[in-house]
Amino acid sequence: MRTTVTQIREMKANGDKTAMLTAYDYSIAQILDRAGIPLILVGDSLGMVVLGYETTIPVTMEVMLHHTRAVVRGTEQTLVIGDMPFMTYHVSVEDAMRNAARFIQEAGCQAVKLEGGMVVAEKVRRIVEAGIPVMGHIGLTPQSANQLGGHRVQGRAPGAAAKILEDARVLEDAGVFAIVLEMVPAPLASLITERSGVPTIGIGAGAGCDGQVQVINDMLGSFTDFVPRHAKQYARLTETIAGAVEQYQAEVKSGAFPTKKHSFTMDESLLTELRTK
Ligand code: KIV
């Protein structure tokens, strides 16, 4: 049985912190699912860490659906959230509802996430009313990085801090089951968390949030073009993979790989017969 949004809300009530991670493919999703991670976000960050774009802007619905399906196939227990990409929920409420429905219907995930506060509140409300759980995302919203002056901390100025606080309240009223707080000062994130009836999930928002989210490639050290300050590397897969690849290449060249263990035999008489032809 998969984790439900009700259970995620109960975790806040019980003071039980939520560890959420991103995943973009079947095999990583399977590992996270078996490790008991309750929430997986198929983030549009895949545009950067999997596809090599400089931002998340080029990511399309088709790409997101493709990766979300793979993650759903790799999970049995985890609640999977599809991240709505740039311009798939901005034009109209109808557009937002139709695209949110595609995640649930065509990719099989259980919830969607979209970026923004007040400006997307009506869309959030209508998607939730249609029966689709929504996770909010405020603070640094990377799809608007051009508008926000890059990937920088949000909410340090008095007006900006008050706006983020208000965005969180409006999103809760609109019916989100949780809110991602990205790159906001820790004291502001703690204040939002205290006031919010739904769990806050921080990334670069300090320890006062109800949960944390990390981009899996950052925490595994498999994406090193840049390492955000808020990322902690629990492994250094780039080095591990490079070491394995070097050893493989050396063994292929020396003939140490493959061995008999990695090869298949056949009937000697058939081989003898083949040699006569
Ligand atoms: O796309 C993503 O991975 C995200 C997380 C950083 C929250 O939105």
Image (spheres, grey):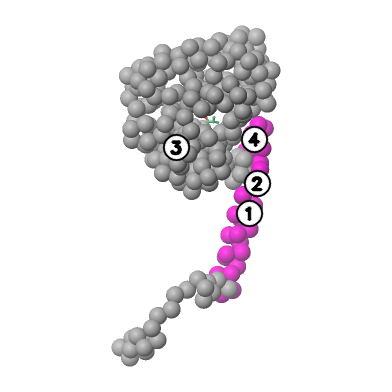
| Mark seen at residue 1 | 3
Magenta stretch containing residue 247, yes or no?
Answer: yes
- Image spot of residue 187 (x, y percent): 69, 18
Compare marks 1 and 4 and give the one earlier in the sequence: 4
Dot 1 crowding, Cα within 10 Å, few <14, some 14–19, many 20+: few
In the rendered image, the quadrant that contains the N terminus is top left
Q: Are marks 3 and 4 in contact (CB under 8 Å)?
A: no
Q: Quadrant of residue 210?
A: top right
Which portion, as a residue range, is magenta? 226-255
In the depicted structure, whether residue 155 falls above or below residue 264: above
Q: Main secondary structure of the magenta part?
A: helix
Q: Nearer the viewer, residue 65 or 127?
A: 127
Question: Is 207 positioned to the left or the right of 272 in the image?
Answer: right
Q: Residue at x 65, y 12 (%)?
A: 157
Q: Are marks 1 and 2 in contact (CB under 8 Å)?
A: yes
**What distance separates the C-alpha of mark 1 from that of mark 4?**
19 Å
Q: Kindly identify the amino acid type of the residue bearing the numbered disc 2.
A: Ala
Q: Of helix, strand and loop, which one carries label 4?
A: loop
Q: Kindly identify the amino acid type of the residue bearing the numbered disc 4.
A: Ala
Compare marks 1 and 2 and give the one earlier in the sequence: 2
